[in-house]
Image (spheres, rainbow, N blue to C red):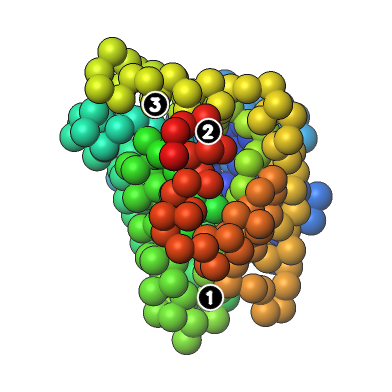
Amino acid sequence: MTTTKTALVTGASSGIGEATALKLIALGYTVYGAARRTDRLRKLAERGVRPLAMDVTDDDSMRSGVDRIVAETGRIDVLVNNAGYGSYGALEDVSQEEARRQFDVNVFGAVRLTQIVLPHMRALRSGTVVNVTSMGGKIHTPLGGWYHGTKFALEALSDCLRMEVRPFGIDVVVIEPGGIRTEWSGIAADHLEKSSAGGAYSGQAEAVAASMRSEAMVKRMSPPTVIADAVGKAVTARRPRTRYATGFGARPLLALRRVLPDRAFDAMMARSVGLPR
């Protein structure tokens, strides 16, 4: 077993995952960057990140990936569950197949990988599980029901897990990104237009998709490095916070959600994406 700490980061091919893998390399970790397509990990490999083919919806893929890490380093000290995507569309419009896929990737994949990793952390009597949720795990936006459902679920699961693994010296940390300049918003807008085009919610879908893609919105978003920095703080802290909310809009919106009545918050969020109140 090596003495250098080892980290596994899922969804490492771009955005938050890529920035986080590089941050952990800079902090001295041996880092495995996981993605379905390893060809998208070449830049990370050049910086010292070890590419790992992994599909978080495939149990065998996750098991073989963890087995490889343990065989090569003897340990896993940090797991960053970052893989995920945004599936937007009216609740009525989104197919059950797509809804299940959203939960499979964003929730069940993260939980299953955590289940596979935890015995190795327990053997070390230490470790940190970092679950990347979203400010969308505490607030809601129109046409984002299935996506928000996954993030609300991962928040709750993280809280329960934190209490369960504390006796084994394992920390569970939630990272709640705000608006981050990645591929996420474009992918979410594409899903939205595909699911709600031409139907009863098409007008809302067009407005929300346009808001997601607007140049003004993209310019205000924070770079992925702000999330990577939060992960870095969490995994190196002697006693990490349970939650780190950071990135464009995260702290103000979470504060407003705590103090505003539901309908007032509804109206504010509708205005923010160009919908009638």
The structure residue drawn at horizontal position 47% and vertical position 28%, both measured from the top left corner, is 208
Q: Position of residue 158 (x, y in %)?
A: 44, 66
Indicate the quadrant containing the N terminus: top left, top right, bottom left or bottom right.
Answer: bottom right
Q: Position of residue 196 (x, y in %)?
A: 31, 22
Q: Position of residue 154 (x, y in %)?
A: 41, 58
Is 97 left, or right, of 168 in this rendering?
Answer: left
Amino acid type at image mark 1: Ile
Tell us which disc is closer to us: 3 or 1. 3
Disc 1 designates what residue? 170
The structure residue drawn at horizontal position 74% and vertical position 48%, both measured from the top left corner, is 226
Q: Which mark is residue 160?
A: none
Residues packed near mark 2 inside 10 Å, few (<14), some (14 to 19) or many (20 plus): some
Disc 3 designates what residue? 204
Disc 2 designates what residue? 273
Amino acid type at image mark 3: Gln
Relative to 122, say whether 214 is above or below: above
Residues packed near mark 3 inside 10 Å, few (<14), some (14 to 19) or many (20 plus): many
Instruction: Name the secondary structure under disc 1.
Output: strand
